Structures are given as structure tokens and as C-alpha cells.
Amino acid sequence: MRESELEILEQYPIEAESTRKIRGAFFINTKEGTMLLKETKISDRRALLFYTLLCQLEESGKYVDTPILNSENKLVSTARDGSRYLLKKWYDGRECEVRREADVLMAAENLAHLHLDMKWRDICSVEEKQEIRPPAGRHLKEEMICHNRELKKVRAFVRKRVNKGTFEAMYLKSFEQMYETGKAVEERLANSKYDELYKSSVEEGLLIHGDYNYHNVLLLPQKVVTTNFEHFRRDVQVLDLYYFLRKVMEKYHWSVVLGNEILSRYNSVRTLQKEELEYIALKIAYPEKFWKIVNAYYHSNKAWMPEKNVEKLELAVAQNQEKLRFLEVIFDFRL
């Protein structure tokens, strides 16, 4: 361990028996169990919200990576060089394997159980004497309008370029199809019940994990552990389900059979409402992967475009048709 990490460990009332470095963090073996030490940019205020949520989830019987308080009763520990760290509980389990369908379905069921308990209980700041609540997620209408505008902006930029490479040529060729899909979803969203769903979710304090994927699910013989809640916020809860479903389906070429099983497993624990299913369908229908690749291109060094980015753009266009077929079969959804 570096001097800064050793300095941080001294701030905790624990005795480290051994340490092991992993990417971006350290496993710490102690008499109290395994812990994870990682550098963080989280603010003290956000850390309090984060800690409060995970304590609430633990109280309801969930297994999560709750932060450990240091000897000064603080959540974030600071080294002399200014770097900030969190020490969290950890579990010796295996990561959910996306190629194992049984693991994927277990993770979908786990998400539904989490959502049933992820409702914010207001806490009050003693210093400020006011309620502290997690931030609300971005409204989907605002997000889609912004993304569609950016797609047009990039097209105008690419058209003006004198030397167009393979990436630029492919983008211009596929722009009309993808942009029309994006606009169709935006219009469909305006006529949906999303606005009511979003407002009620935010007002009721319903929370999402914010980054629920198979990397953040650990499987043990008798328990499922969920980790890395740093991006949690108030939002429409099935946003988590959409994200998990999309990440898995991209690996399975939008398999109707597995997609239906994932939704069914979630629904067996927490019943999906009609407006929630419509929301998931709208999120899937939007060409988000295409926008993400194009946006990254626009903000990158365009003098050299990696071949992998061309392949990613190609795949995003190809998967758009797979997604639309998937939506027709499972959601009876057509643009």
C-alpha cells in the first residue's frame, strides 16, 4: 500500500491483518471481516445521504457495502495530500456472470427486492435545521430534446469537415434513420404518462441505484450483495431495470426469451405498472448508444479515430433494428 492509504487506515479503529490491491482499491482483511478501501470524490453531504440509505437497507435485511465510520465518527477520511477515501464493508462472493442466465435472473429479482425498500426517509441536518434529500434525476423529456439537438449539431460539424474518415461517413449515412427514431420517441414520450410517473416518484422519495449492472452484484451461497450505490437519486425506479436489461440484452443480441424472463422475474416480486412498462419501452427505443458514441466523438481528438469506435457505431446501428423487433414482441410497442 502507498503511504497515503496506510495513513488512512490509521484513522479507523480496526486492525488490518492483510491487504490486497485490486483495480482502484484495496481489500482489507480484518477480524471484523473483509473491507474495501477506495479513493472517492464524494462530498461530505453526499456521503451522509449515501450512508443513511445503506443503513436503511441493512435494517430491512439487504446486504450492501455500507461505509465504516472512522475514529472521528466521519465517513470520509482525508490524507495529508488531500486525497479522500471511503472504507466500506465488503463480501467474499463472486461477481454476477452475465453469461449465466441463472445469475442474471437472480440479479433481476434482487433489484425488485431492493426497490421495495428504496424509499427515502427524510433526515434533518442539525446544523442547518432543514430536511436533507437526495437530488432528483433529470427529466427524460429534457434529456431527449438535448440528445436530439446534439445529434443535429454533430451532423452540421461533420458536413463541414473537408477530410471525412470512415467514422464520419458512417455517421452521415445512418444519421437520418437514427435521428428520426430519436424524434419519434421524443414525440411518443410527450403523449405518454411519464410526466406523472416522474413527478410522483420524485415527490414520494422513490430511489434508484443509478448504476445497477452485473458488475455491482455479488453472489454468495445464501445471499445476494449489491454494491456501489454512489449514483443513487430520486427517480423512476424502473430506470434501473431498463439499464440492467439493456446491458444484458446487448450481450444476448436482444433475446426475446431471456428479456421476457428478466421482466417476469422482476415482476414476480414488484408488480410492474402499465406506465412503467411504457417508460422502459421508450428508453429502449431511443438510440442512446448511438448518441453516446457520437457525443464522445464530438468531444474527442478527431485527428485520429480508433477503429474500435467505428465498430461501436456500426454495432449501435445494427442493434437498433434488433431493439425495435424486441419491443414489438415483448411490449407490443411500435414507433
Image (cartoon, rainbow, N blue to C red):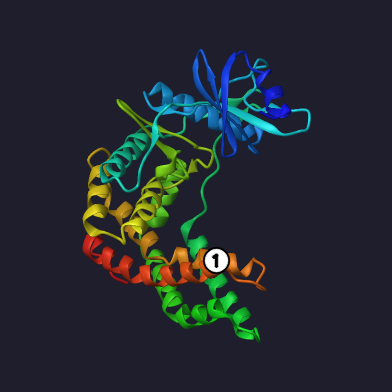
| Residue 61 quadrant | top left
Tell me the residue at 53%/42% (across/down): 231
Instruction: From the viewer's side, name the closer residue of 313 and 245.
Output: 313
- Judge whether residue 145 can be spotted in this image: no
Q: Quadrant of the N terminus?
A: top right
Tell me the residue at 51%/78% (across/down): 171
| Residue 130 quadrant | top right
- Left or right of 254, for residue 76: right
Q: Quadrant of the C terminus?
A: bottom left
Which residue is outermost to the right?
80
Instruction: From the viewer's side, name the closer residue of 219 and 275.
Output: 219
Tell me the residue at 49%/64% (across/down): 144
- Left or right of 297, for residue 178: left
- Left or right of 281, for residue 66: right
Tell me the residue at 52%/61% (across/down): 142
Measuring from the top left, give residue 235's x and y in whole percent: 45, 46
SS at mark 1?
Answer: helix
Amino acid type, mark 1: Cys
Quickly name the residue at label 1. 146
Measuring from the top left, give residue 211's x and y in whole percent: 47, 45
- Judge whether residue 313 can be spotted in this image: yes
Above or below, 239 relative to 289: above
Measuring from the top left, give residue 325's x and y in whole percent: 27, 68
